Amino acid sequence: MAKAPPNGLTIPHVAGVAPSVPKGTPDPCRHRRNKKKKQVFVVYMAQETGSNPSKFYVGRTRGASLDSAIANRERGHHRTDIGKLVPVCQADSYSACRGAEQKHYNHTKTNGDAITTPRSKGKGAQIAPISDDNPKKQDYLDCATQSAQPSPPKCPICAAP
């Protein structure tokens, strides 16, 4: 059984819909829900097997529901050395999910709980979700914050500015 994520959440935080922005104002959550495709975006954590102290992988996936997204990702995950995927956040948009993944990765890395192993045959390293030179990085982080703040219970990691 996978250890609970280090952020203390036992059930995934479900983000709200980020508030609308006035016309003419750039929208950090421009990747809004595709109303034709009913999808949820999920951030998950998984403990690296055999790590002592515990190290965690942070990733994201999407699907028709939280359960199907996690199940599909577990079946085809590139990491063969991690345990069960534990959902920590569910978002309504791709942008909010990217930002939430980055925030959870940063939190895990700051606490010294992130996987930092180099890539090797059969297993990949923890990949930083958004590169520092990505011009949309701040938009993704802002969208995660905006989406998390109106929803109870707030994820303390996503809702932080």
Image (tube, helix red, strand yellow):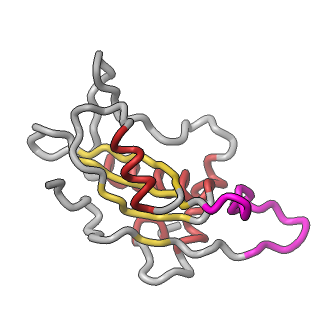
Residue 50 is situated, as x and y percent measured from the top left of the image, at 10, 37
Q: Is residue 41 above or below residue 127?
A: below
Residue 61 placement, left or right of 112: right
Query: For the point 62% across and 62% down, which residue is it?
Result: 38
Q: Is residue 99 above or below residue 20?
A: above
Q: Taken as a whole, is the magenta stretch helix, strand or loop?
A: loop
* Closer to the camera in the image, 149 or 48: 48
Quadrant including the N terminus: bottom left
Residue 9 placement, left or right of 36: left
Residue 68 is situated, as x and y percent measured from the top left of the image, at 43, 56
Q: Please tell me in which quadrant of the rendered image residue 12 appears.
A: bottom left
Query: For the point 31% across and 33% down, which residue is it?
Result: 79
Query: For the point 56% across and 67% down, which residue is it?
Result: 145
Residue 107 is situated, as x and y percent measured from the top left of the image, at 36, 55
Residue 89 is situated, as x and y percent measured from the top left of the image, at 43, 64
Q: Is residue 99 above or below residue 160?
A: above
Q: Please tell me in which quadrant of the rendered image residue 150 appears.
A: bottom right
Residue 70 placement, left or right of 149: left
Region in magenta: 20-38
